[in-house]
């Protein structure tokens, strides 16, 4: 992770987690509770080598555990071939203003569940996500997710709104 990249978020944007696709079924995701760490190293990532959305299962290697939210990342990689990076942040103000204005998952669906994974896939497949590629997690207060061809593209989506 380049230094300064995370610095962009000093103005109150908290990280949930970020991930980068390695190949079709493999991605690297920042582990739980790394949000306050300024510069992420390999020790802060888990390598997810396989996943099963229906059974809510992730197979991972690495020095840290993939967080329960990694299933959401897996869901996006599985249905959007051109996506190579997913960024999940917590931001109350942006969440409130985008709720039901951008693509929003149902408020009854909790984060880290197969239901959320499938709801996100539906929004993508039905082309309900706007050009910003931002999805509001209706059942996860402050939770927003963006995806893109590169990590920069995914992260920049939050700065444009
Ligand atoms: Zn979150």
Image (cartoon, rainbow, N blue to C red):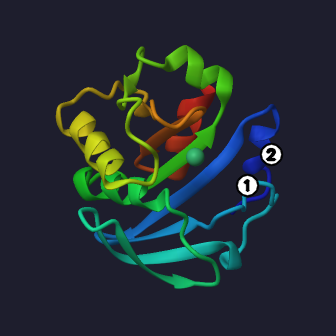
Q: Which mark is residue 18?
A: none
Measured from the top left, where is residue 145 in percent x and y? 49, 40
Q: Are marks 2 and 1 in contact (CB under 8 Å)?
A: no
Pick out the residue farthest to the front. 108
- The CA distance from mark 2 to mark 1 is 12 Å
Front-lying residue, 146 or 66: 66
Residue 65 found in image quarter:
bottom right
Residue 35's disc is 1
The structure residue drawn at horizontal position 47% and vertical position 51%, both measured from the top left corner, is: 86
Horizontal and vertical percent for residue 48? 44, 75
In front of the other: label 2 or label 1? 1
Horizontal side of 128 relative to 92 (left or right) equals left
- Identify the secondary structure beneath mark 2: helix
The residue located at (57%, 84%) in the rendering is 62
Q: Position of residue 123 (x, y in %)?
A: 26, 34
Q: Which mark is residue 7?
A: 2
């Amino acid at each position: 992770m380049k230094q300064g990249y995370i610095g962009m978020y000093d103005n109150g944007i908290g990280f949930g987690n970020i991930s980068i696709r390695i190949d079709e079924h493999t991605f690297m995701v920042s582990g739980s509770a790394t949000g306050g760490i300024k510069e992420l190293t390999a020790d802060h990532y888990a390598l997810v080598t396989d996943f099963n959305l229906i059974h809510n299962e992730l197979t991972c290697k690495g020095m840290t555990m993939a967080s329960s939210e990694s299933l959401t990342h897996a869901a996006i990689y599985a249905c959007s071939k051109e996506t190579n990076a997913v960024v999940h942040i917590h931001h109350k103000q942006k969440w409130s203003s985008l709720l039901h204005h951008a693509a929003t998952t149902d408020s009854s669906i909790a984060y880290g569940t197969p239901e959320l994974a499938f709801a996100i896939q539906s929004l993508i497949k039905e082309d309900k996500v706007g050009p910003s590629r931002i999805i509001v997690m209706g059942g996860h207060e402050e939770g927003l997710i963006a995806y893109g061809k590169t990590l920069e593209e995914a992260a920049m989506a939050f700065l444009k709104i």
